[in-house]
Amino acid sequence: MQVRTSLPMEREPCVLALGNFDGVHLGHRKLLLHGFEQAVVLGVGLDVLIFEPHPLKVLFPERGVKLLSSTQERLQYMEELGVHTVYHLPFTLEMANTSPEEFVEKILLPLGVVHVVVGFNYSFGAQGKGNPELLQALGQKHGFGVSVLQAQTKDGRVISSSSIRKAILQGDIQLASSLLGHLPCLRGTVIHGEERGRALGYPTANILTSDDFLIPKRGVYAIWSLIDGRRVLGMMNIGMKPTFHEMYDTVVEVHFFDYDGNLYEKEITVFIEERLRDERKFDGVNELLKQLDKDCSTAKAVLNQTRDR
């Protein structure tokens, strides 16, 4: 799969999928599959256009939208789904002020589109004035087809990035996973912490995450990570360590069950299988240790059931 950060010098006929594709959830996959089917019929490749940063971060920074996936993760999923080329273009205020007609003439036509695939709620152009109906009209004018996919559902629930974010913030990992079609994850750099866990017999990797990404509800989770090509099981705590602090910033700590290497300064991705319990304050270290032993047993049981997933 090719990744391009600018428009091509020459038009290359393609079917183009438009969207943000945050999380590359089941709805996105349905859209990309439809695009791939159109590409096969038309004898061209399936390309995708995404913008960085997320347009909402530029247009509505006050909303503080948190992302489900990094650009690299989105690209990996798209490659697995058979995308030929991803155009990864910068989203600026100048781009935001482009009219729908200019967007088609200056962006889509130079890409060589013969067919475009969008979701029912896709918007484009200044103030979001462009909608799928206008895109279809512009397609007729300029000679390309347009497919509009309606909302996708799973078990009666609409699949959307916003509904998945809500589920994760509520700690409903099962729901988030079912809508994503894969496990939600956290990514970040391992940094030095207070090293209290090591003294308790539960050494932890403290993960510094980017402010751009969503952090799940506080609590304890069963997780795993790929370290040096090996699937390493563990449990994760997201919280403020109330047993030891009255006020403390939220931290992400991971205890791996079978790993004793040095992870400091390494980038790791943590895949979240299940939420085990709420964060709570304990009456001393002994009570905390008893609960950690229970958490460890519970997490291992959960992860052993999902080992072959």
Image (cartoon, rainbow, N blue to C red):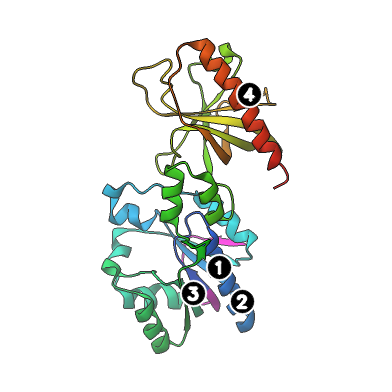
Label drawn at residue 48 = none
Residue 143 sits in quarter: bottom left
Residue 160 in percent (x, y) is at 45, 59
Q: Is residue 292 left or right of residue 304?
A: left
Label drawn at residue 37 = 2
Mark 1: amino acid: Lys
Q: Which residue is mark 4?
A: 262
Reply above or below: 174 against 192: below
Residue 68 in percent (x, y) is at 47, 49
Q: Secondary structure at mark 4?
A: loop
Q: How far is mark 4 from mark 3, CA to CA?
A: 46 Å
Instruction: Please tell me which of labels 4 and 1 falls first in the chain.
Output: 1
Q: Callout 4: few (<14), some (14-19), or many (20+) C-alpha neighbours within 10 Å?
A: few
Instruction: Please tell me which of labels 2 and 4 falls first in the chain.
Output: 2
Reply above or below: 215 against 181: above
Q: Secondary structure at mark 3?
A: strand
Q: Which residue is mark 1?
A: 30
Residue 13 lies within the magenta run: yes
Label drawn at residue 117 = 3
Instruction: Please tell me which of labels 2 and 3 falls first in the chain.
Output: 2
Q: How far is mark 1 from mark 2, CA to CA?
A: 11 Å
